[in-house]
Image: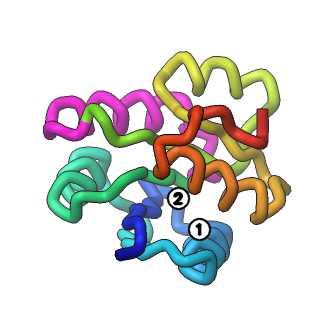
Amino acid sequence: MPTRVLVAKPGLDGHDRGAKLVARGLRDAGFEVVFTGIRRRVDDIAATAVQEDVALVGLSILSGAHLALTRRTVEALRAAGGADIPVVVGGTIPAGDVPRLRAAGAAAVYPTGTPLDIIVADIRALTEGQDRRCASE
C-alpha cells in the first residue's frame, strides 16, 4: 500500500503550479497524494490530514506568510490529533527564514528551486521512519 501524503495550499495564495508539480512527482515516485487545492484554511488542512490518515503534510506557500501559516498548521494538527504528522514547507522562502520555520515545527523546508529528487528523498525518509535526516540539510 503506498504511503499517503497531503499537499496543501494554505491561505490566500492562488498559485498552485509548484504544488501540482511536487504532487505529480510524489505520485510518480509511488506515493498516494491527496491534493487539497488552493486557498485552504489551516484548520481544514489539519482535519483532512487526520481524516485521510496521511503520513506527512506538505505546504506550498508563495505568499510570504510561510512563518505564520506553518506555525498555525503545526498547531492545528496537534489540536486535531495529528501531532505525529510531520509538516514540510516549500515555496518562496528566504534562506534566513529556514531556521525559523524549523523552530515553528517544519520537519523540512524547500525554497524555490529545490530539486524534486531531493524533496522526494526527504519525504520518503520522513515517512518511512528512517533516521529523519533530510537530504536538503
Label at residue 19: 1
Q: Quadrant of the C terminus?
A: top right
Q: Within 10 angstroms of label 1, few (less than 14), some, or many (20 or more) residues? A: many
* Residue drawn at point x = 36 percent, y = 69 percent: 36
Q: Helix, strand, or loop for circle 2?
A: loop
Left or right of 75? Residue 106 is right
User: Magenta part of the protein: which range?
Assistant: 61-82
Residue 117, horizontal then vertical, whole percent: 77, 63
Residue 72, horizontal then vertical, whole percent: 35, 32
Name which quarter of the figure residue 115 lies in.
bottom right
The span from disc 2 to disc 1 (Cα, nearest Å) is 11 Å
Disc 1 marks a residue whose amino acid type is: Ala
Disc 2 marks a residue whose amino acid type is: Asp
Is 75 magenta? The answer is yes
Left or right of 55? Residue 116 is right
Colour mapping:
rainbow
Q: Helix, strand, or loop for circle 1?
A: helix
User: Tags 2 and 1 in contact by the CB under 8 Å rule?
Assistant: no
Left or right of 74? Residue 81 is left
When the figure is inspected, residue 71 is found, relative to residue 51, above or below; the finding is: above
* Residue drawn at point x = 46 percent, y = 63 percent: 7
When the figure is inspected, residue 113 is found, relative to residue 98, above or below; the finding is: below
Residue mark closest to the camera, 2 vs 1: 1
- Decide which of tag 2 and tag 1 comes sooner along the chain: 2
Residue 40, horizontal then vertical, whole percent: 34, 59
* Residue drawn at point x = 27 percent, y = 55 percent: 49
Quick one: 86 or 48, which is closer to the camera? 86
Q: Which residue is mark 2?
A: 13
Quick one: 130 or 31, which is closer to the camera? 130
